Image (cartoon, helix red, strand yellow):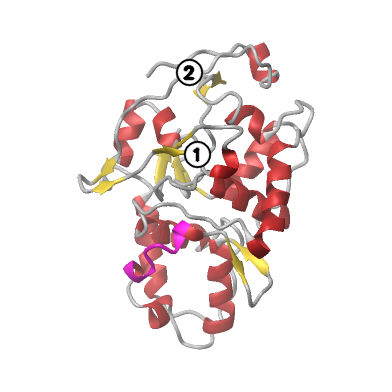
Amino acid sequence: MNFKTMSLIGAVALALPTLGMADPDDDTLVINGDIAITTKAPAPAHLSDSLDEVMSGWHFRSDETQAMEMDDFDNPGMIFVEQGVEIWNAVDGGEGKSCASCHGAPEEMAGVKAVYPKWNEAAGEVRTLQMQVNDCRETRMGAEPWKTDKGGSIPMEALLASVSRGMPVNVAIDGPAQATWEKGKEIYYTRYGQLELSCANCHEDNYGNMIRADHLSQGQINGFPTYRLKNAKLNGTHSRFKGCVRDTRAETFSPGGPEFVALELYVASRGNGLSVEGPSVRN
């Protein structure tokens, strides 16, 4: 890989136009030898003024980290998929039902992850996949909801992502979802914290550069949930958002709150055309 190094001063002032861009690698991601993952795609129309191409964070990782994701036996995130299968088949709640009672095998849910977050007409709101799972738990199973990125939420999302691997992300941003999308876009470009950094400063203006001995990616979330070697666990999208905002030295939003729901919708739409990749492996 050929990345340029960003100085400490540059890390604090990420938006400086003088910082050079670096090309990610051209490696190809095929999982288990048969699941081809689209890791580079033309940027969706709503990004035409900012990017020509969208790229998975997989391209910004070392060869060793990349290799872990190419084989499910080496991917530590697959342990959580196995937990998700157990949860899927377990009866929970007062109605005596499991997820399988209504939906059958997990493979029947192929393609679901690719379109979330999405507008839910009955609820009158944009819902993340975790929110929709909780609605099923409460209304159909009579079970307690999980907190965002905690409990069974992450294994379940990992399972649903795994059965959609290779399918194109296709998150709708028009119609009734547009207002939430616009809110997410505003958050993405707003500078936060003592460092006065926005999501765009890192992931749009400086992807490919280095910060704290790590490469900045485009911040795509098509690979979430993602197993991070840094904290040795599977991480959810909102938890990663929380960490990013915290790193600007700002008071962050709450996982599951309306701000991060809107941000997830917007960031997911930036990856339209890439493949569902989770559970991925990252630094």
For image coordinates 72% across by 29% down, the residue present is: 197
Tell me if residue 257 can be seen. no
Q: Is residue 45 above or below residue 83?
A: above
- Amino acid carrying label 1: it is Ala
| SS under mark 2 | loop
Q: Is residue 26 above or below residue 95?
A: above
Please identify the quarter of the rendering in which residue 196 is found. top right
For image coordinates 70% across by 33% down, the residue present is: 198
What crowding class fits label 1: few (fewer than 14 Cα within 10 Å), some (14-19), or many (20 or more)?
many
For image coordinates 56% across by 69% down, the residue present is: 132
- Residues shaded magenta: 107-114
Main SS, magenta residues: helix
Q: Which residue is mark 1?
A: 43
In the visual, does 132 lie left or right of 71? right
Which sits in the foreground, 243 or 106? 106
> Where is residue 189 shown, x and y percent of the image?
71, 37
Tell me, for residue 22, which label it has, or none: 2
- Amino acid carrying label 2: it is Ala
